[in-house]
Image (tube, helix red, strand yellow):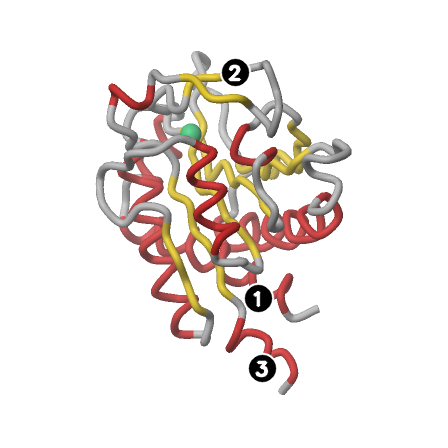
Amino acid sequence: MLAEAIAAVALICLDPGHGTRPAIGRQREPIGPGSRVTKIKDGGGARGEADAVLAIARRARTLLLRRGYRVAMTRTGGTFSGGNIERAQFCNRREASLMVRIHADGSADPSWSGVSTLVPARRAGWTDDVYSPSRRAARAVQRSLVGATGARNLGLVERSDLTGFNWADVPVLLVETGFMTNPREGRLLRSSSYQWRVARGLTAGVARFTSR
Ligand SMILES: [Zn+2]
């Protein structure tokens, strides 16, 4: 009952990566509050990634709503007209229980494959408030994602350089759902049936995290 009550009020913020209008994507933004280090808002991602991760996010939204969660999405269409600061603030404003950033990887080496989950590195003033719950969520999501897809488990990776992490005031993680550049995994990530499997893994991981 308690788990259901929490699920009924928890808002999950889904952030499908990329899809930024090019004129905005090449603008720069500080990687964290007060930082002089800047990065571009969006390099565009791997080929086919923006469409695949949007499809996965839509499927995850369907499954999460079915379980009683509230869901917000930073973009529901092909384009997004902000940077990673805006993406984080979108989820902050809604006081999300978890921000799930959905991406897919790319590599010059087509043999690379597998799933990883990125989490914020601990930094005082930026991420110390969300570090522990983000790690807990990431462990749950990574395990469920690997279980649902059978993909290679590349584990958790801490990142200090991601703008969308450093501006987040809610628990946050970024799933790299596979490699678009791997012929087999790239084909799977573009297929509806595998997108549903990824979405089921994400949903199960979120449920495991929020029911604690
Ligand atoms: Zn990406």
Q: Quadrant of the C terminus?
A: bottom right
**Toward which corner of the image does residue 159 lie, by quadrant?**
top right
Mark 1 crowdedness (10 Å alpha carbons): few <14, some 14-19, many ≥20: many
Q: Which residue is mark 3?
A: 5
Kindly report which numbered mark, 3 or 1, lies closer to the viewer in this rendering. 3
Residue at 42% of width from left, 17% of height from top? 28
Q: Amino acid at mark 1?
A: Ala
Nearer to us in this view, 81 or 63: 81
Q: Amino acid at mark 2?
A: Thr
Q: Quadrant of ligand 1?
A: top left
**Toward which corner of the image does residue 33 lie, by quadrant?**
top right
| Residue that protrudes farthest toward the front in the picture | 34
In this image, 116 relative to 181: left or right? right
Q: Which residue is mark 1?
A: 207
Q: Secondary structure at mark 3?
A: helix
Numbered label attached to residue 73: none
Residue at 43% of width from left, 12% of height from top? 108
Q: Quadrant of the N terminus?
A: bottom right
Labels 2 and 1: the sequence-earlier one: 2
